[in-house]
Amino acid sequence: MGTLLPTSVEVSERDYEEVTSPSEILDAGALFVLKSRGSWLHCGYHLTTSIVAPALLSLPYALSLMGWFPGVLCLILAALVTFYSYNLLSLVLEQHAQLGRRQLRFRVMAEDILGPAWGRYFVGPIQFGVCYGAVIACTLLGGQSLKFIYLLSIPKGSMQLYGFVSIFGILMLVLAQIPSFHSLRHINLVSLVLALAYSACTTAGSVHIGNSKNAPPKDYSINGIMQDRVLGAFNAISIIATTYGNGIIPEIQATLAPPVEGKMFKGLLVCYAVIIMTFFSVAISGYWAFGNQTKGVILMNFVVDEKPLLPTWVLLMTNVFTLLQVAAVSVVYLQPTNDVFERKFSDANSDQFSIRNVVPRLVFRSLSVIVATAVAAMFPFFGDINAVIGAFGFIPLDFILPVIFYNVTFKPSKKGLMFWGNTSIAIICSAGVLGAISSIRQIILDANTYSLFANMATVAPNSMSISKIDKEKGVTDSSKELDAGALFVLQSRGSWIHCGFHLTTSIVGPVIFILPFAMASLGWVPGVLIITLAACVTFYAYNLLSVVLEHHEQLGKRQIRFRDMARDILGPGWGNFFVGPIQFSICYGAVIACTLLGGQTLKFIYLLHNSNGTMHLYQFIIIFGAATLFLAQMPSFHSLRHINFFSLILCLAYSACVAAGSIHIGKSKNAPSKDYSINGSQQNQFFSAINAISIISTTYASGIIPEIQATIAPPVKGKMFKGLCICYAVIVSTYFSVGISGYWSFGNQAQPTILANFMGGGQPLLPTWFLLLTNLFTLMQVTAISLIYLQPTNEVFEKWFADPKMDQFSTRNVIPRLIFRSLSVIIATFLAGMLPFFGDIMALFGAFGCIPLDFILPMVLYNVTFKPSKKGLRFWGNTLIAVASTLLAAVGAVASVRQIVLDARTYSLFADV
């Protein structure tokens, strides 16, 4: 494996003198990205850029939610608390440096002080989420600033927002190649000046408008009823807190040349001098000028009815300053990601600018910028999402953890002011996370304006609108006429037999190889009973789903997507924010899992012929991904019908091979002892049983029943039931044969994949040709499964980028299809190669996703649609299944998380498992 561990590299004598104590060995991330060469002045530049950003333009809006006294008081308190907490963080870092252990990363600091789990599962993920979220938000803001400048010159210009986001992304692509944090010092000095400049412009503009003849009436009362005021106040606190957020204090202090003592304090003085000049001037002047009419971003108040209240050159200059500074902010918040890439893929023994290190740096930094740009363009409402990330991220990292670190490190007297002051700050700021509730509420309020790639002109949550062009595409009401996704991907041309092929491929896959292992955690009677019950419940649930779809079609409203179905029956929020995201996660997660399994199968075949082979798993994953890249271009769901028929034959074939192999081994002379007792302590038996039930339930999952039914040519009545009969005939002949034969043969020694039991001591227990044949069948069928679960992603791409008025195979439609389908396969292949432990993560997705979609929602949708009598068996039967499945999902998720925690020590990116 090519990854580098922090303890596996050597550094030069010069590097030892610069960045570490003799007892510490640095990885490439620390050596190349977090170079310790800066002065306190450089540190001040970095701190200012990471904190003083265009987010401060939301401060007048925060004041309008609180009023003069509470608003200004919160601004002052946030400044004092963050200056104090950042200084405490610096003192803790200095203390550990003096003890010979210089901590260069926030997650390392948490691991050393609070324990490994805090760094790995709390601080690390939160910091990455906050920093990469900031990069996406800055990319979106950069695109919006570019569009604003464009519209100042061409008021009726037709370029879409995503075009400007892409242009800004190209700029970021270049800046991201700057090698180290220290190399940004000059850029961050310019950034400091730019922050002062656009803050001065904004303040001057607010004062000018406030003193003009056309000044808006100055009303400083707080709008709304009491409930709105309370939630607005929490939202304001969250905005102010996240505006002061940083999240990378240890990484910035790591750029200081040793000795570091006292330097961070000077850097903070530089930073907070700028903060006082910018935050307070912008907030107070903006609120003074516009009162409770202040909008989410103060610059929006400078334009009324598309007419600027200031000279065009002032608006242009302000936006240019903002645009340039936001590029610097993006590069600063890319550094934690760059550090991870450098640590994993660079060689600390080679020169930083050698080809060995430059090539992976170029590839992975470019990839991170491309992904951020794609997400920013796709989610122009990302500001709302980032507000939630900020509330959950910045407050713990910048307000709570510093005081905890100080108390744990220095152990101040519990009778002293320092201990109780720090404890009070931690407790009060923990309550500040309630601001996340207000952010989530804002998302719900704005949900009806959300659409992918929408042409939004501003970043303010309360000002987002869908362009006329988007409306013409069917963004606001896809039900009125079919979009390109429905016309081209979900073509309604199939028969009930084709439907049976699709259903079988979506449900029956190599995941059935885990059934003997699940039975080993339950025993004979419970195991067979659960497999039988799951079959009966899912057949019933899928039939209910089909009946609901048929009913709505008869009413003149054919629902062709799961999210549309939930939106129409339960309300828009359910489709947009529950079913849609869950279905996408499950389906795309299944594509990643299939790609991983395809690579593992290829590697197994390779090792059968060359047991000493040196090829790594990720290379086989890339080979499998190349095959999927080609097959993913098949234009529609319906065009997969022949592949899915072949897939049906393949799953029968490898199931027969596995059952025959298990029986052969079980009857052989070297048959393992058949012990059917359940292993482990009572606690482990309980969690294993819950995990087994969750596993069995998710093996029956589909998640795309409405999309499959959408492929049937109308009238659809009764056709889905026939398709389900085909599918469940295959299920009965495969699930029960594999599960029962595997458990009979290997008992409680059954492995998570029964094929692993076919190897004993590294030697095959069956003829090589037999194992080869079984794995070839598996490999080919898993390709078909990955294609079928790509269809929801393909449908989204087609909906947004294809033109339904043009031919499906016109150049206009073929080119975006080729680009975006290829991109989705490439990303899935990359994630499969990077996360070879994705199976554990997918088990968690299954508990949270498959069970709600396939066990709970069908019952709920049926009861809501048909309203069966509450005195009847149908209503209470459905309700009982929904409640029991909800409990199973919750407990199954706990068991999955427990398994992740148990296996975490074995996780490694790009591991050769």
Image (cartoon, grey):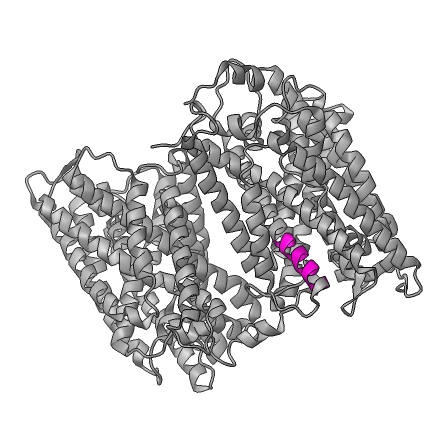
Nearest the eye: 236 or 250 = 250
Q: Residue at x 16, y 51 (%)?
A: 774
Give x and y (percent) for residue 507.
30, 62
Q: Could one spot residue 343 in this view of the protein? A: yes
Figure quadrant of residue 730: bottom left
Q: Nearer the viewer, residue 545 or 763?
A: 763
Q: Quadrant of the C terminus?
A: top left
| Range covered by the magenta-colored residues | 140-152
Q: Is residue 469 left or right of residue 784?
A: right
Residue 341 magenta-highlighted:
no
Q: Which x, y percent locates residue 149?
A: 70, 58
In the rendered image, is residue 876 in sight? no
Q: Is residue 911 left or right of residue 127?
A: left
Image quadrant where one finds the N terminus: top left
Q: Main secondary structure of the magenta part?
A: helix
Within the magenta stretch, is there residue 142?
A: yes
Along the line of sight, the residue nearer the viewer: 594 or 826: 826
